[in-house]
Amino acid sequence: MVKTRAAATPRPSAAGAVATATGKISFRSRKIVKSTSAKAKPLATTPVPSPLPPVLPALSSPGELAAALSHLHSADPLLSAVIASTSAPTFISSPSLPAFHSLAHSILHQQLAPSAAAAIYARFLALLPSAAAGTDAAVVNPASVLALSAADLRAIGVSARKAAYLQDLAGRFAAGELSDSAVAAMDEAALLAELTKVKGVGEWTVHMFMIFSLHRPDVLPSGDLGVRKGVQELYKLPALPKPEEMAALCERWRPYRSVGAWYMWRLMQSKGAAAKKAKGNAIAVE
């Protein structure tokens, strides 16, 4: 009977090798890493810009002023009393002056008494060519203003500074930076950003231009002293409200803050007239 030798059981060595009959087979332990499915990254999307706020109908549009008065009556009882005791504003429904002409008019009237400003403006128009032979309608456009020299403007009483303002305004319109149609289509933020680039045109001038030339319904000239005094009087405030306080106080007037501001001017005019009348009566009694 032939005896068979049992195969030797492999013995692990200290070095981590397995001993076999034929030799040593080395191995290294490996760490098992669990595979995870890669998370899909979200696709980058291009942000969609917010649409620009629409330009509201002009106050000279049919029915717009009536809508403004109705809103202000219901939104502010104190203002409602002022509206009831004051004649309603009028905004000319016929086409107003083009933007360039209106801004030139504003620059010429800056910091002047109404009578002095009217006289200088009349002389300014007389310097310009007529729209047609035999008419008094002057052509107020960038080209006609650029044709005037600083000496021409000084001769009619325009200061050197204002002459430079007019030339800068005309130059920007002539270069295409501004145009009548572009200005008419701009919202308040764009108007403030673009028009204040013109020398001599500040926030107050732009606000007046928007209210009285473009007839924009929702403009709050929060830096105007007359409007601030009117708000102080209306709400019986202990101090003149700061421009940033004006925004909060007049928020209820939206979207017709232009009309609310107009009534603040009238409120202060009526107060001044009443004080003048009272003073006259007191003198008469003495």
Image: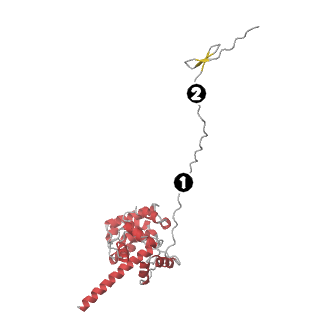
Which three-letter amino acid code belongs to the residue tagged 2?
Answer: Arg
Percent x, y of residue 72: 46, 77
Of circles 1 and 2, the one toward us is: 2
Q: Are marks 1 and 2 in contact (CB under 8 Å)?
A: no
SS state under label 1? loop
Residue drawn at 39 percent across, 74 percent down:
126
Comparing 41 with 171, the one in front is: 41
Residue drawn at 38 percent across, 68 percent down:
245
Percent x, y of residue 56: 51, 70
Residue found at the very far left of the displayed protein: 286
The quadrant in which residue 203 appears is bottom left
Position of residue 131 in the picture relative to residue 202 (left or right): right
Residue bearing the label numbered 2: 30
Q: The N terminus lies in which quarter of the figure?
A: top right
Percent x, y of residue 36: 60, 38
Residue 147 visible to the viewer: no
Few, some or many C-alpha atoms within 10 Å of disc 2 (few <14, some 14-19, many ≥20)? few
Position of residue 238 in the picture relative to residue 255 (left or right): left
SS state under label 2? loop
Residue drawn at 36 percent across, 72 percent down:
228
Residue 47 marker:
1
Which three-letter amino acid code belongs to the residue tagged 1?
Answer: Pro
Percent x, y of residue 278: 29, 86
The quadrant in which residue 251 appears is bottom left
Residue found at the very far right of the displayed protein: 1
Q: The C terminus lies in which quarter of the figure?
A: bottom left
Comparing 190 with 130, the one in front is: 190
Residue found at the very far top of the displayed protein: 1
Q: Compared to 110, does 194 lie above or below? A: above
Comparing 143 with 76, the one in front is: 76
Inter-mark Cα distance, 1 to 2: 47 Å
Q: Compared to 119, does 27 lie above or below? A: above
